[in-house]
Amino acid sequence: MRIGILSDSHHDHDAIRTAIHLMGQVDHIIHAGDNYSDAKHISKEYGLEVTAVKGNTDMGLGKLEKILEMNGRKILVTHGHKYHVKRGYQKLYYRALEAQVDIVVFGHSHVAVKFIESNILFINPGSVSIPYDDNEKSFAILEIKDEENKVNLQYFG
């Protein structure tokens, strides 16, 4: 299974279009917040199945986190602001342990990162629209095959 992961798109439809094009064939899209309505746009415009959560700039409908079961993996999706990820990952790590997930997808910091802690894979795709720390715009591809989880962080101008 091949999953495209976006976050912090902030209504930048040109950047979304570029990221979707660069992803190639994906089975699913995860949008980790800011802006929730962009996930609806992706689903409608590109005919892709999208799971999304609200971020700190989102108002109205939508959940702050979701837990998915995909291809034998349990995935926590959250924007990250609730767990103060700009100051560290400890609160998010404890939430992942509590939820007994295999993978955590989050955003909020606008900085792409991937790491493993206690056999839990953490993925922040960065921002598809407004990257921080002099990075390029970014997204992630998660490939789940048998016992292996492979993550590629991809950058574009």
Image: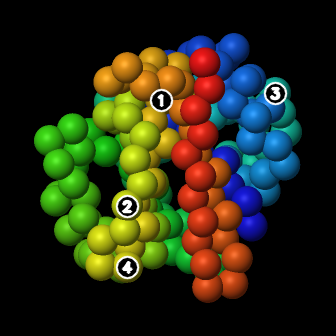
**Would residue 20 appear left or right of 51 to someone viewing this image?**
right
The label on residue 45 is 3
Query: Distance of mark 2 from mark 4, alpha carbons?
Result: 10 Å
Question: In the image, which disc is placed on residue 119?
Answer: 4
Q: Position of residue 132 (x, y in %)?
A: 35, 23
Q: Indicate which disc, 1 or 2, sits on the residue closer to the N terminus.
A: 2
Whole-angstrom CA distance, mark 1 to mark 4, is 25 Å
Whether residue 51 is visible to the viewer of this picture, yes or no, is no
Which of the marked residues, 4 or 3, is nearer the chain's N terminus? 3
Q: Position of residue 107 (x, y in %)?
A: 40, 40
SS category of the residue bearing label 2: strand
Q: Nearer the viewer, mark 4 or mark 3?
A: 4
What label sits on residue 108 in the rendered view?
A: none
Identify residue for label 2.
115
Q: Are marks 4 and 3 in contact (CB under 8 Å)?
A: no
- How far apart marks 1 and 2 lie (CA) works out to 17 Å
Q: Earlier in the sequence, mark 1 or mark 4?
A: 4
The residue located at (81%, 27%) in the rendering is 45
Tell me residue 61's x, y (percent). 48, 35
In the image, what residue type sits under mark 1? Answer: Ser
The residue under label 1 is 127
The image quarter in which residue 100 lies: bottom left
Query: Disc 2 residue type?
Result: Phe
Going from N to C along the chain, the mark reached first, 3 or 1, is 3
In this rendering, is residue 84 above or below 59? Answer: below
| Mark 1 or mark 2, whichever is nearer to me | 2
Question: Percent x, y for residue 128?
Answer: 55, 27
